[in-house]
Amino acid sequence: MKKLKKWPQFLAVLLILGSAALPYVVSQMQDAFTERKSETRTITAMRLPVGAEQRIGQILQMCAYQNLQMMWDGATNLTAPEVENSIKEAVAQMTQAGLLENVEVADGEAIAYLYVSEKDWQVSTIAWQYTWIDKDMRCYASVDDTTGKLLGILHGDYANGFDGSEAIKVTSMEEMEELAHKWAAFCEDYYGISTFTVSDLSQSEDSSWFTLAFTLGEEGETETCEIQVILQPDCIIFNM
């Protein structure tokens, strides 16, 4: 009987100790859960569960708007020489389509960046920024690390008044409209997105610009996206 009388006291001590330890245990469980959750979200964002057409459209749209970026020193799908080759191939196709003239890409510097969309935190990618000198002009291009597709290009010395470039010159609204439709056709073929249209054609004394719109998603859940092309006598800017 004496042993049985001691059990309530023993249980009371266990309950007190358990109550004292509970906040610490809960805190540790919350920390562990948060770490697992954060890690899962990062991996999910890097591997988008969408088709290639939908994905490259999202990345194009992300690059056209504000986004967060930081230098990336982790693993990449492409190497720096492969980035340069991707730009050369894209420039060759753009030249054949009548969008560029006499553009040379060589001996540039390629740096990988992690981009995260401020519009949709689940959309992110690794993109390369490539800088090179062509005819004494500093030029820029960006390339998606996953697909190797060109995301944007600036050919011409934008910071110094567009001196010396030999980009396509546009002298009338009719010529600009024709060129804009060439850009739309090129983008449809290059990115595999069949919904590109031309809108918002504008022109000033020294520049022309227009918007290329395209849609993403399925019927009933589509999103209209836009990228811009700016043309000046000595410079061309596509989605930069």
Image (cartoon, grey):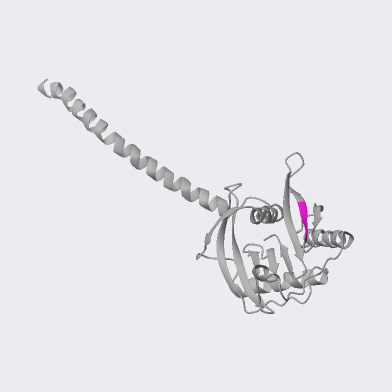
The residue at the point 80 percent across, 68 percent down is 99
Residue 146 in the image, given as x and y percentages of width and height: 63, 62
| Residue 31, image x, y percentages | 38, 44
Check the image and name the residue furthest to the right.
Answer: 174
Q: Is residue 18 above or below residue 105?
A: above
The residues colored magenta run: 208-213
The spot of residue 2 in percent (x, y) is 10, 22
Instruction: Name the chief secondary structure element in magenta.
Output: strand
Left or right of residue 116, residue 149 in this image:
right
Q: Report the front residue among 172 and 142.
A: 172
Quadrant occupied by the C terminus: bottom right
* Along the viewing direction, whichever of 56 and 205 lies nearer the viewer: 205
Residue 206 falls within the magenta-colored stretch: no
Q: How many numbered marks appear?
A: 0
- Answer with left or right where residue 110 lies relative to residue 90: left
Q: Residue furthest left?
A: 2
* Quadrant of res 110: bottom right
| Residue found at x 47% / y 48% | 38
The single residue placed furthest to the front in the displayed view is 205
At 70% across and 54% down in the image, what residue appears? 57
Q: Quadrant of the N terminus?
A: top left
Seen from the viewer's position, the closer of residues 229 and 197 is: 229
Above or below: residue 21 compared with residue 4: below
Give the residue displayed 39% in from the left and 45% down from the top.
32
